[in-house]
Amino acid sequence: MNHPARLVVLVSGSGTNLQALIDACADPAYGARIVAVGADREDIEGLARAERAQIPTFVRQVSDFETREGWDAAIATVVERFEPDVVVSAGFMKLLSQDFLDRFLTLNTHPALCPAFPGMHGPRDALEHGVKVTGATLFVVDAGVDTGPIVAQVPVEVAEDDDVESLHERIKTAERAMLVDAVGRIAREGISVEGRRVRIGAESR
């Protein structure tokens, strides 16, 4: 690629996935740079991580808008200013509208092997179901909940003595590595999405 891929990262909390991307982008060979970090609330560690890395930040809180549609339009407007090649939802706890998703290629992670165990409690649901292997998924966000086309997956074995917290911690570690690897490959090689089939390197950005 002639220029680094432009990433906008959206966060709602501590920003550990964001930090992994910040660290990866420090290497010019990675092929991407974070041009902005957005959040849906003030005073979170994710924003502080961006500010320490001298990355522009913005906040759009739902409570500051009369309607959810107004908030979504405001998010889309500010994201568009940064001309992203990819938007990464890194622990961003708000659903984005179809209009937003039509405008920006948006990626998200889920702490399970989709389509298994969607929703807020992937590790808990995996434990309760008694599976021996779970993991993490990177997908292209669509209008559903954790239902978008799958970009990458990584397996994580369930230990006999796992509780939700210990399993989730191992999943998050695997998830960060998967995210960094896949976003870097997308930045360097491009991505194509046809229906539910995602190919990295199939065509340039």
Image: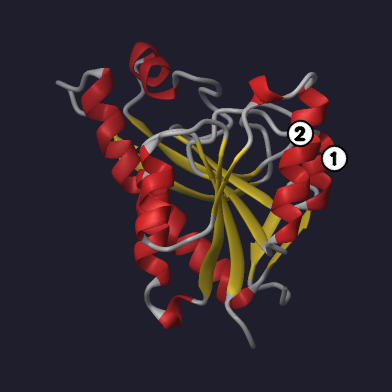
Q: Which residue shows up at 42% across the image and 16% down it?
A: 125
Which residue is at 41% across, 55% downward? 51
Label drawn at residue 99: 1
User: Is 118 positioned to the left or the right of 105 in the image?
Assistant: left
Which residue, as the protein is rendered here, is positioned at the far top?
128
Residue 108 against residue 202 in the figure, above or below: above
Please say if the residues under marks 1 and 2 sit with CB atoms less than 8 Å apart. yes
Q: Is residue 80 above or below residue 119?
A: below
Q: Is residue 5 above or below residue 87?
A: below
- Horizontal and vertical percent for residue 55? 48, 61
Q: Which picture quadrant has residue 189?
A: bottom right
Amino acid carrying label 2: it is Asp
Identity of the amino acid at label 1?
Answer: Asp
Label 1: state its secondary structure: helix
Q: Position of residue 193 (x, y in %)?
A: 75, 57
Quarter of the figure that contains the C terminus: bottom right
Say which residue label 2 marks.
72
- What is the secondary structure assignment of the residue under circle 2? helix
The residue positioned 40% from the left and 61% from the top of the image is 22
Can residue 158 be seen here? The reply is no
From the top left corner, tell me how far across and down residue 2 is, in percent. Answer: 64, 88
Closer to us: mark 1 or mark 2?
Answer: 2
- Could one spot residue 102 in this view of the protein? yes
State the residue at coordinates (37%, 16%).
124
- Nearest the viewer among 89 and 162 is 89
Q: Looking at the image, tell me whether mark 1 or mark 2 is earlier in sequence order.
A: 2
Crowding at dot 1, Cα within 10 Å, few <14 / some 14-19 / many 20+, comes out as few
How far apart are the two marked residues, 1 and 2, measured between alpha carbons?
Answer: 9 Å
Q: Is residue 34 above or below residue 143?
A: below
